Image (cartoon, grey):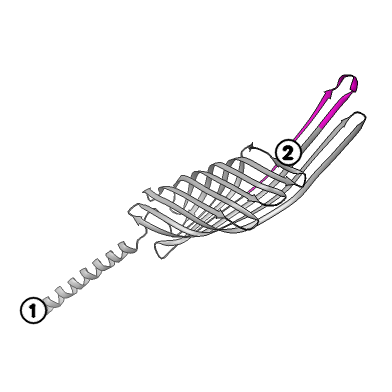
């Protein structure tokens, strides 16, 4: 065979081999359509809160029972950064602030002994900040990716509690009040799992769940988060995400003041999402 034919065939074979190798490398390193290199979501968590408060004083304790409040919109921010094709960082933050108050006044007739008046009330101002940062490992197969992560969660609680009461009758009266400010913050270990599925590159399903266990010290308890939702990208890099989620915070403290804090938030989250 002529030398120029051998050279031509050799070059053609090398070109095919290089093309095949490049295609295989690209296929091996290509991302699952369910994942993004980087994404940022900013939105509102339209939540229905239910609160249970325990307050301890030198004179006794008070338990509010379950208090269900009106729905409130909480700012929520989340971000994901993918590293090394199958690992990455995940961040989530929200803040809750609300005031609660109750009061009563009753009058009783005691016939020839006159009357008795009883009045009282309580107020509570709460602020909760929650942020979590985790390192995730993603295991993808086609359009589906399953992730597991470990990290840390921060929470900060501030409360202003107050109560008052009065008693009047028999020509005398008595009144007393109680007020206290409390604040706690801590960092606790976090475990989480996640699932991503792409029906198409621009229409995807996601689900996440995480748990925090805080033991020891003055404050101890649990924080759980779970959400499931859909996201749609009408343009390549910008889309919307709609999710339904539940956050359950249950913390206790062995001291006077705020001894029990149980807050449950559930409802939809609508976010604007950017991906790159």
For the residue pair 138 and 230, the one nearer the viewer reads as: 138
Task: Indicate which disc residue 114 carries.
Answer: none
Task: Name the residue that disc number 1 marks.
Answer: 2
User: Horizontally, is 214 left or right of 146 in the view?
Assistant: right
Give the magenta range.
96-118
Residue 53 falls in image quadrant: top right
User: Horizontally, is 67 left or right of 195 in the view?
Assistant: right
Instruction: Please state the horizontal and vertical placement of residue 78, each as a whole percent of the image.
Output: 53, 54
Of badges 2 and 1, nearer the viewer stands 2
Q: Residues within 10 Å of mark 1 (few under 14, many from 20)?
A: few
* Residue at x 85% of width, y 27% of height: 116
Instruction: Please state the horizontal and vertical placement of residue 174, each as a whole percent of the image.
Output: 87, 36
Residue 132 falls in image quadrant: bottom right
Q: Secondary structure at mark 1?
A: loop
Q: Residue furthest left?
A: 1
Please tell me whether residue 67 is drawn above or below residue 113 in the rendered image.
below
User: Horizontally, is 78 left or right of 142 in the view?
Assistant: right
For the residue pair 265 and 242, the one nearer the viewer reads as: 265
Task: Name the residue that disc number 2 marks.
Answer: 101
* Residue at x 46% of width, y 58% of height: 149
Q: Give the mark nearest the N terminus, 2 or 1.
A: 1
Q: Residue furthest top?
A: 111
Q: Main secondary structure of the magenta part?
A: strand
CA gap between label 2 and label 1 equals 97 Å
* Residue at x 61% of width, y 40% of height: 49
Q: From the image, which quarter does the N terminus lie in? A: bottom left
User: Is residue 105 part of the magenta span, yes or no?
Assistant: yes
Q: Are discs 2 and 1 less than 8 Å apart at CB? A: no
Instruction: Please state the horizontal and vertical placement of residue 204, each as a whole percent of the image.
Output: 41, 48
Count of numbered circles on the image: 2
* Residue at x 41% of width, y 65% of height: 84
User: Is residue 148 part of the magenta span, yes or no?
Assistant: no
């Amino acid at each position: 065979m002529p030398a120029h034919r051998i050279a031509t065939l050799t070059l053609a074979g090398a070109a095919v081999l290089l093309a095949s190798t490049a295609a295989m490398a690209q296929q091996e390193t290509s991302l699952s359509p369910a994942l993004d290199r980087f994404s940022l979501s900013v939105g509102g968590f339209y939540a229905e809160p239910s609160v249970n408060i325990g307050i301890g004083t030198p004179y006794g304790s008070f338990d509010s029972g379950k208090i269900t409040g009106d729905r409130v919109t909480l700012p929520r921010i989340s971000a994901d950064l993918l590293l090394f094709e199958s690992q990455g960082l995940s961040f989530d933050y929200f803040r809750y602030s609300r005031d609660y108050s109750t009061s009563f006044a009753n009058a009783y007739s005691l016939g020839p002994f006159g009357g008795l008046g009883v009045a009282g009330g309580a107020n509570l101002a709460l602020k909760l900040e929650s942020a979590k940062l985790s390192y995730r490992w993603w295991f993808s197969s086609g359009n589906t990716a399953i992730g597991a992560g470990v990290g840390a969660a921060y929470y900060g609680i501030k409360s202003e509690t107050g109560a008052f009461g009065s008693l009047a009758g028999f020509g005398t009266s008595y009144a007393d009040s109680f007020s206290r400010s409390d604040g706690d913050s801590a960092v606790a270990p976090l475990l989480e799992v996640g699932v991503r599925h792409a029906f198409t590159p621009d229409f995807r399903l996601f689900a996440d769940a995480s748990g925090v266990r805080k033991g020891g010290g003055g404050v101890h308890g649990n924080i759980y988060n779970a959400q499931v939702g859909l996201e749609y990208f009408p343009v390549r890099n910008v889309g919307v995400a709609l999710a339904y989620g539940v956050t359950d915070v249950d913390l206790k403290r062995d001291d006077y003041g705020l001894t029990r804090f149980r807050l449950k938030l559930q409802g939809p989250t609508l976010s604007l999402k950017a991906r790159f």
